[in-house]
Image: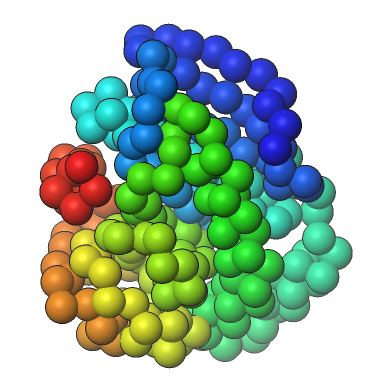
Amino acid sequence: MRFISEASSDGVREQLFTLGEIPGVLWTPECAATTRPLVLMGHGGGQHKKAPDLVARARRFVTECGFAVVAVDVPAHGDRPKVEEYDRIATENQARVEAGEELAPLIADFQALVARQTVPEWRAVLDAVQQLEHVGAGPVGYWGVSLGCGLGVPFVAAEPRVRAAVLGLGGALASAEAAARITVPVEFLVQWDDERVPRVQSLALFDALASAEKTLHANPGKHGEIPAFELESTLRFFARHLG
């Protein structure tokens, strides 16, 4: 793990790093020196590790909960190079949608493909970050919606260090089998008028989760219109299960 830069503001320390070919960013309290909970955040499709909404959420986890937060660019996003195969699939999918096929199954198949790479990458990132003295091997949470949900469900299912997860804006087409292996507490976000993920698929994914404690947060609006107040719920959820 190699740190590239470091900056601090308003009590939050931000460190950019690379782990092999994976670019990432770690946020911690400015004076952190001991073990603390860690939240891994998965960004949305077409976004990156420092998307404004993700950064704002991460900084609140740090300042209000004392957590560490880590995010990385998934393949073909942010500072990572384009992947020829992914570009080809995206072009083919666009043509298939224009020809009348449904979008949701195509998104699900693509996310399942990318998850085969990201799950081991994210586990390696957890290994490296938890070796740092100002993070340590404390409890781990996961937050990810949209693409972050499609990649996050198989990750949470595979990673025993994760104690709680916030997921959403995803469907069961490619994730139901992995969801059935998730038993940690989950808060699940659904946009009732989602134009990208059919409501029935989102509800099916929630139903597939094997968690004894899971809550469905359904709000009116389209795919990218999660209400701001859901962040407050997320903060309380992770504080309860990780703090």
Across and down, in percent, residue 238 comes to 22, 48
Indicate the quadrant where residue 188 lies: bottom left
Q: If the image is split into quadrants, where does the N terminus sit?
A: top right
141 w.r.t. 12: above or below? below
In this orientation, which residue lies closer to the viewer: 92 or 125? 125
Residue occupying the point 37% across, 28% down: 34
Residue located 77% across and 46% down the image = 20
Q: Is residue 211 above or below residue 35?
A: below
Q: Quadrant of residue 208?
A: bottom left
Figure check: 85 above or below 7:
below
Q: Nearer the viewer, residue 89 or 120?
A: 120
Point out residue 53 in the picture as x, y percentages from the top left corner: 40, 36
**Near-viewer residue (134 or 214):** 134
Structure colour scheme: rainbow
Across and down, in percent, residue 107 comes to: 55, 75
In the rendered image, the vertical position of residue 143 relative to residue 62, given as above or below: below
Task: Spot the residue most to the right.
Answer: 84
In the rendered view, does 188 fall on the left or right side of 160? left
Q: Residue at x 23, y 32 (%)?
A: 65
- 80 lies left or right of 138: right
Residue 233, can we see it?
A: no
| Quarter in which the C terminus is drawn | top left
Q: Residue at x 22, y 27 (%)?
A: 64
Q: Which percent across, then down, holds residue 221? A: 24, 58
